[in-house]
Image (cartoon, rainbow, N blue to C red):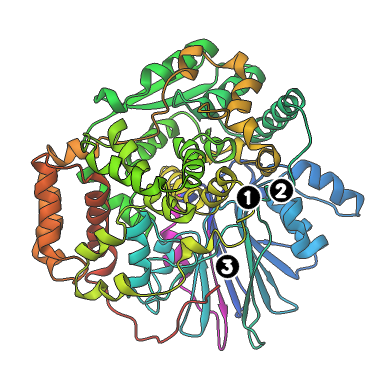
Amino acid sequence: MCGIVGAVALNGSASLDIDAAISQLEHRGPDDVGRWTDGRCSLGFRRLAIIDLSRGGHQPRASACGRYHLVFNGEIYNYRELRTELQAHGRTFASASDSEVLLAAFEQWGEGCLPRLNGMFAFAVWDVQERELFVARDRVGKKPLYYCTAAGRFLFASELQALLTDPAVTREPDLAGLDQYLRWGYVPPPATGFSHVSKLPPGHWLRVRPGRTPVTAIREWWRLDYEPKLDVDEADACDALREQVTDAVRLRMISDVPLGAFLSGGIDSSIVVGLMAGMSGSPVKTYSIGFSEAAYNELPHARRVAERFGTDHHEVVVKPDAASLLPMLVRHFGEPFADSSAIPTYYVSQVARRGVTVALNGDGGDESFAGYERYVGALLADRIARVPGSAATMRAISSILPSGTGQKSRIRTAARFLAVAGQPLPSRYRRWQGYFDDDARSRLYGDAMRPYVDAIRPDWFDRLFDDIEGLSAVDQAMSVDVRSYLPSDLLVKVDITSMACSLEARSPLLDHRVMELAARLPVAYKLRGRRTKHLLLKAFEDLLPPENVNRRKMGFGVPVGEWFRGPMTGLLRDALLGEEARSRGIARPSEVERLVDDHLARRGDHTPLLWSLLVLELWFRELVDGHRPSTSDDHACSA
């Protein structure tokens, strides 16, 4: 695990202030630092030592013949099996590190090594002979990779902070990207919050070939397929699933440093902890987060699982001091990011890092096994949409429901569902998942953003549905989540917050073998009536306390709405109603003031909208305002 940076000369030299860039990544790798250059390419890295704690894991790493030079962020879990296969091809190894195996795999198979890798990764290989850079990112996007061109160089890094140390990288905001942020709470790839910086999408590789046409080329190398469905009975499917998940956990317990697990008390993390307990010779260290607000507190459920498996359990209760934490988190994310659960994820990572260097989690179970209530909604809405006149009826019912209170209100959830139940799936899903919908953005946007309200253009989100029309409504919803919400929200949140604490987070349920098996199973195996995760529950029913199974899913919510009405009122008013925010032209001051006043007076709950606006304003203050603009006219490479 590490942070990586690099530069390739498109003309002239590849000068890059490596020291300044990698200093911004020290949190991603406090154990070692490395640099290499040949005048055309410069590479740098910071290492968090996990496997082979000696210098065997040092990077940048050169191949034996000196042709290839690698920097690599992540873990290759099947590196031992790959090393055995490569040895059969005559390769020899001088260390026990996965980075040496990855470089040998690339040398042996080129880009063909990617489907053989089981892991999380973003890596770059410079080919001295061909003067070509190859960059790749893992299947679902666990490890990030940002890039741009500036002053005749192609630059890349694990985090935006490292790129922004280069004075030639402009910090001009990308208003189209900010429009997407206000829709979804994140900026989808390849865009970022900055107009001249891009991010490599998950499951893609990129080549940079200076002096040749095209200079850059991007290709998708992995896509999760939901068809054809497997012809397998439920009992055999349970056995296959249990075997795959168990092996995924086994691989992610390979470590030369202490490891533990995040434990929420939900189904997914409980399964992971239960399997870990069965494979560990000592109590598993588990870490849980809670809140004083009962509606958001899962500590009793996590404690029940910890007691069942005799773990070495640690808990922390988050108090509303986000005002002191937010600016730091905004800098780490580098671009606007509105998932408020980043706060407890950071805190649980901070607590876990005191005892372990690696923490397993349950991420990915919802997206693979239909764990969200919205998948039930997708199924029901699909049936409703087939009934003539149903759309108008559902909207009418929605309009007379009371507004409900709080983000977790069942009335609020029902109203959101019924308002769009008769619409096509893309429209329904946009409303269920979005922050500011079209009407809200029309009311909100100031002069700078007005063009993005009325613009008629293919939308990023709509394009996700282009090639999946033949799938069932539930499979379509899961496919869209795997290519949007999962990589751009959940995985970004966990990577940034855990690495900010120098902690490696591993996700067994995101093993591609588990995901590919789950995707090909019949929908009825995952969603049985209103019972979500049916097959996962059946396969692991012996590990799960009944009390934890038979309760409504809580999610990883944060009581930000109440914090706004209490200790964060001052920050909210200062940031959103102050002169700096008013002068940007992003939002109409009168509309922002209405949202703030309504929320504080409990005339409505605008928590997600206010939080996204607050983070956006802090992003401007921390990363845009006061920084010298670049004179470079270079633009980021585009996909």
The disc, 2 or 3, on the residue closer to the chain's N-terminal end is 3
The image shows residue 147 at horizontal and vertical percentages of 50, 69
Q: CA distance from mark 2 to mark 1?
A: 8 Å
Residue in view at x 58 percent, y 35 percent: 369
Going by the numbered disc 1, the residue's amino acid type is Leu
Mark 2 → mark 3, Cα distance in angstroms: 41 Å
- Tell me the kind of residue under disc 3: Leu
Residue 511: image x %, image y %?
Answer: 65, 41
Residue 43 tag number: 3
Q: Give the label, 2 or 1, closer to the camera.
A: 1
Residue denoted by label 1:
471
The mark nearer the N terminus, 2 or 1, is: 2
Residue at mark 2: 227
Residue drawn 55% across the image and 16% down it: 544
Identity of the residue drawn at 46% across and 50% down: 492
- Would residue 6 be counted in the magenta stretch? yes
Q: Which mark is residue 337?
A: none
Left or right relative to 249: residue 399? left
Span of residues in magenta: 4-27
Callout 3 crowding tier (Cα within 10 Å): few <14, some 14–19, many ≥20: many
- Give me the residue at 91% from left, 54% from top: 90
Vertical relation: 165 (above or below) 596: below
